[in-house]
Image: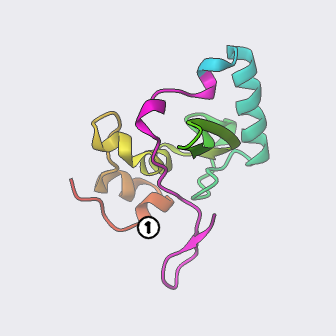
Amino acid sequence: MIHTSGDGPALRLRVELVPRPLWGRNLRDVLSRSEWQRLRRWALDQAGEHCEPCGLHVPGGRNLICHEQWTYDNATRTQTLIGVEIHCRDCDVVTHIGRAGVGALPVPTRHHRSRRRCQAARLDPIRT
């Protein structure tokens, strides 16, 4: 899903809230380490070692996150994997802002926003 912000470029960053019963469940824990690394490397190659929401390029993919994209069905209490996407740490924190709200992730600060041109930096400031 692509969103626009005023006159600026299209924004690809989404806030994803995970239903509480599914907190902490992820594909990385289901796959073997080698399977997860193979999937992550494939996703990095597909993204050209760029953060897909903001375009930050990190040669070798170091510190880029392979973010799982899920849909949730409350009626059947199921989650379905619909894709993976590469995120920089700042974009991943914004995507998982619900975790930041419970103290599991740091909220991006003005310092983070000034260090790199990241989509998270182009959003309205987060008040802490």
Q: Inspect the magenta stretch and tell me whether residue 6 lies in it.
A: yes
Q: Is residue 66 above or below residue 37?
A: below
Labels in figure, total: 1
104 displayed left or right of 48 = left
Q: Inspect the magenta stretch and tell me whether residue 103 lies in it.
A: no
As rendered, which of 79 and 3 lies closer to the eye? Answer: 79
Q: Is residue 14 above or below residue 88?
A: below
Instruction: Name which quarter of the figure residue 32 lies in.
Output: top right
- Horizontal and vertical percent for residue 55? 62, 57
> What secondary structure characterizes most of the magenta part?
loop
Amino acid found under the numbered disc labelled 1: Arg
Q: Residue at x 54, y 59 (%)?
A: 13
Q: Is residue 59 above or below residue 50?
A: above
Q: Secondary structure at mark 1?
A: helix
Q: Is residue 39 above or below residue 51?
A: above
Q: Which residue is mark 1?
A: 122
Q: Residue at x 59, y 62 (%)?
A: 12
Looking at the figure, which quarter contains the N terminus?
bottom right
Task: State which region is magenta.
Answer: 1-28
Instruction: Name which quarter of the figure residue 127 lies in.
Output: bottom left
